[in-house]
Image (tube, rainbow, N blue to C red):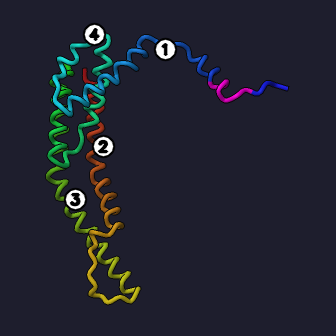
Amino acid sequence: MGEIKSAFEKAMERVGGIGEPSKEEKLQWKYVPEGQKLAAAYLKEDSNLLNELGKFKDEERRYVTKGLEEVLLRNITLPLNEPARKTNKKAMDAIKTIKKDKSALENVYTKMRRVFDHHAQQGEQQRKQAYEMLKQEFQVRIQQAMQQQGLPPGTKINVESQPQFQDEWRRTLAHLDGQYNTLLEEYRREIEAIR
């Protein structure tokens, strides 16, 4: 009868076939997280990125910059409030300091700013209209439900405080903002490709 191997033994056999990580993989595993930490610290307390990057050797800096850029790009979001606007500006300024092709970057930033402006202007109007339509729709549904249950038609219910209304509003907002987020994701990828 054949030998029965434990899950651990099978896993160790698979790991044994992988081999030793390359120097590049080791550098990436060590320095990408360093860049991510550097970006988080910068966004929180405004450290000097160029000075911090200067502390790394050239071969390390490539990976530190990669981690730094990942976090900065993730922090460019729809400016729903003043703190988000400030974070966007800070992240975009930091990316500008680490990219060489400033004109290509500025072209993408111009497209991003158009998305931000459109979201703030027309998007706000769309959100208000969608909110009022949803509120009216829920008022009609609640009135119908009250009639079916035999409650007097004049009974007042705060539609906006209903959990179902709140859930539906969150889904509606996600749908409205989804179009903007799709564009932002496309622009983030363009920024990643810029040297």
* Labelled disc at residue 182: 2
Using a 10 Å C-alpha cutoff, classify the residue at mark 3 as few (fewer than 14 neighbours), some (14 to 19) or many (20 or more).
some
Q: Position of residue 70 (x, y in %)?
A: 30, 29
Going 29% across and 48% down the picture, which residue do you hit?
Answer: 179
Using a 10 Å C-alpha cutoff, classify the residue at mark 2 as few (fewer than 14 neighbours), some (14 to 19) or many (20 or more).
few
Task: Indicate which label's residue lies in the foreground, 3 or 4.
Answer: 4
Pick whichever, 164 or 124, lies toward us: 164
Task: Indicate which label's residue lies in the foreground, 1 or 3.
Answer: 1
Which segment is the magenta one? 5-11
Q: Position of residue 173 (x, y in %)?
A: 28, 56
According to the picture, the residue beneath numbered tag 1 turns out to be: 21
Disc 3 or 2, which lies upstream in sequence? Answer: 3
Give SS at disc 1: loop
**130 with respect to 141 (left or right):** left
Disc 2 or 4, which lies upstream in sequence? Answer: 4
Residue 131's place in the image compared with 139, above or below, is: above
Q: Are marks 3 and 4 in contact (CB under 8 Å)?
A: no
**43 with respect to 21 (left or right):** left
Q: Position of residue 122 (x, y in %)?
A: 16, 54
According to the picture, the residue beneath numbered tag 4 turns out to be: 58
Q: Are marks 1 and 2 in contact (CB under 8 Å)?
A: no
Q: CA distance from mark 3 to mark 4?
A: 48 Å
Q: CA distance from mark 1 to mark 3?
A: 51 Å
